[in-house]
Amino acid sequence: MRKIRKRKEKQKKKILIISIFTFLLIMTSGYAAFSTNITLTAKGNIKCNPEIAKEKLIKELTTSGDGLYEDSFEENRYIYKGENPNNYIKFNGELWRIVSLESDGTIKIYKEGALGQNFDEAGYRDNSSNGAGGTYCNQMTSGCNVWAATNKLVGNPLEFSSGMFKGTVLLDSTLNEYLNNEYYNSLNSDKNYIVMHNFNIGQIVWYDETMFLDDVIEKWNNTASEYIWNGKIGLLSPVDILKANIENTTCSISSPEGYSEYDSDEFNCHLNSYLKSENHRNMYLINPKGAQVGANMSTVSLAGEINDATPYHPYTAAFSAAISFYLDSNIKLCGSGEETNPYTIYNQ
């Protein structure tokens, strides 16, 4: 009996030890999981400290090197300058770049789009369609270089004028139609942040003299703003390209043999900024080239040179588009703007 009693006591002790060990193991595991959860939650809270876009971006204002600068041509407007500023933003699941913080608080963003689309299709608005594009486009055979119909412009001007060409434009360019319909509809829910905004679509002129970049900006600002289109999706302008350069370099016309001063191949401003084609293409911009001969569009090259090209080209792979639009002024941003940690739009 005594042996049986001792055996039972040993079993009880064994069970008690196992129970205590199991209890401690469960408690330890539970604490570790709880601690991990707290850590992850804390990290999640630290990861995003959302701020109104304007307030967040202006904190990074600079006067030297790559970064955000005050726009010396427009009050309460700020622009990114330099070869690679921290102005990356995630939109539609893709990396875009912030170009400017507008005086109304909206944010202008941009992305190069290899769309396989011309600025305008031949025959859509010109003489092969019996003047369906109006008297301005009726004079052009390689597409028309105006972004939008005159009755859709702010103030509804009676006609559009660019160099030697003048007249009514009845239809939007085919790229305008594509971007504001099929392309817009293909965007994810981020498109709800895009707002209607003014785009300057007047002409720019190649000058036959050497001048400082700031002087060219002032002249192009004046001519480009003569015609304004209000819409959702547009393109960058040559003025955007010039303003992204840090130094007030000189600009001069480049006239290969056989070109006249008004129909030169490029207007060279020795630019060095992030706003240039990245894929060996000429990137379509929104403004027509005002010239005495031809009816071309402004483009920007891989080297950052302001070039010109016909609105229609049979080899579309040689061209891309500087897609651009404005985001709502009320959005909040997280992130630092670096390529590895881009600004993201905060959703509650």
Image (cartoon, rainbow, N blue to C red):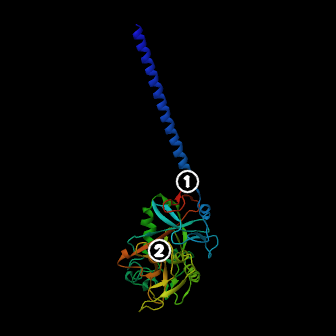
Upstream in sequence: badge 2 or badge 1: 1
Residue carrying label 1:
48
Q: Tell me if I can see residue 167 in this picture.
A: no
**Secondary structure state at the residue bearing disc 1:** loop
Q: At which x and y percent is residue 113?
A: 43, 69
Please report the residue visible at 45 percent of the width from the left and 19 percent of the height from the top. 13
For residue 174, which quarter of the picture? bottom left
Q: At which x and y percent is residue 328?
A: 56, 62
In the displayed structure image, the side of residue 109 where residue 56 appears, left or right:
right
Of 10 and 243, nearer the camera is 10
Of 99 and 169, nearer the camera is 99
In the displayed structure image, the side of residue 303 where residue 63 appears, left or right:
right
Mark 2: amino acid: Lys
Please report the residue visible at 48 percent of the width from the left and 28 percent of the height from the top. 23
- Which quarter of the rendering shows the N terminus? top left
Please report the residue visible at 61 percent of the width from the left and 73 percent of the height from the top. 71
Q: Residues within 10 Å of mark 1 (few under 14, many from 20)?
A: few
- Residue most extreme to the right: 75
Q: Residues within 10 Å of mark 2 (few under 14, many from 20)?
A: many
Marks 1 and 2: in contact by CB < 8 Å?
Answer: no
Residue carrying label 2:
276
